[in-house]
Image: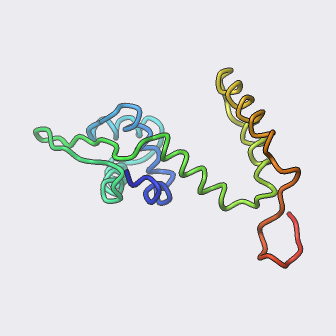
Amino acid sequence: MPTTEITETITNAEWCVMRIVWTLGQADSHTIIDLVSQQHDWKAATIKTLIGRLVKKGALATTKNGRQFIYTPLIAEQAAMDTALAGQLDQMCAMCRGQAFVNAIDQTELSQDDIQELIQHLQTKLTTAPATISCDCLPEGYEGSC
């Protein structure tokens, strides 16, 4: 699956469509339009454009079923989320990412199981983590910190 290239170009609006198709497994355009319209004040033509863009990008496959098109995801949801998040993290200062994680955790509703899994991963990562992380915003040889 070409997840890496696709998720870097999926817009916020297109994510809304993908989340619906991932959740349902497959959906026709009427279902997608109905569900997106309940969440956003977008016209049907706008949603159809988003669907068309996702097909062109290779994120959705189309199958004709009578007069309807059925849309199926061509990229896995978890892989797409992981790639999108990694792309965002790559844009941040290495020294400041930890605080961004803390802020994200504070602002994100997590289940007790999610929190327990995070604790376990962090405890394991703590054993090999460096004492500090350097700022990587400037080329080597320049001084600065965020």
Identify which residue is drawn at 88% across, 50% down.
131
Residue 33 lies, in percent from the top left, at 34, 41
The furthest residue to the bottom:
141
Residue lying at 42% horizontally and 42% vertically, measured from the top left: 76
The answer to which of 82 and 20 lies nearer the viewer is 82
Q: How many marks?
A: 0
Answer with left or right where residue 141 lies relative to residue 45. Answer: right
**Residue 67 in picture, x, y percent from top left:** 12, 41
Quadrant location, the C terminus: bottom right
Q: Residue furthest front?
A: 128
Dividing the picture into quadrants, the one containing residue 53 is bottom left
Vertical side of 124 occupied by 134: above or below: below
The answer to whether 42 appears left or right of 62 in the picture is: right
**The residue positioned farthest toward the left in the image shown:** 66
Q: Residue at x 47, y 42 (%)?
A: 40
Measured as percent of width and height from the top left, residue 42 is found at: 42, 47
Of 44 and 13, nearer the camera is: 13
The quarter of the displayed image where residue 68 is located: top left
Q: Left or right: 144 with respect to 97?
A: right
**Nearer to us in this view, 23 or 74:** 74
Residue occupying the point 34% across, 43% down: 73
In this rendered view, identify the residue nearer to me: 95 or 108: 95
Q: In the image, residue 62 lies at what x, y percent?
A: 23, 47
Colour scheme of the picture: rainbow
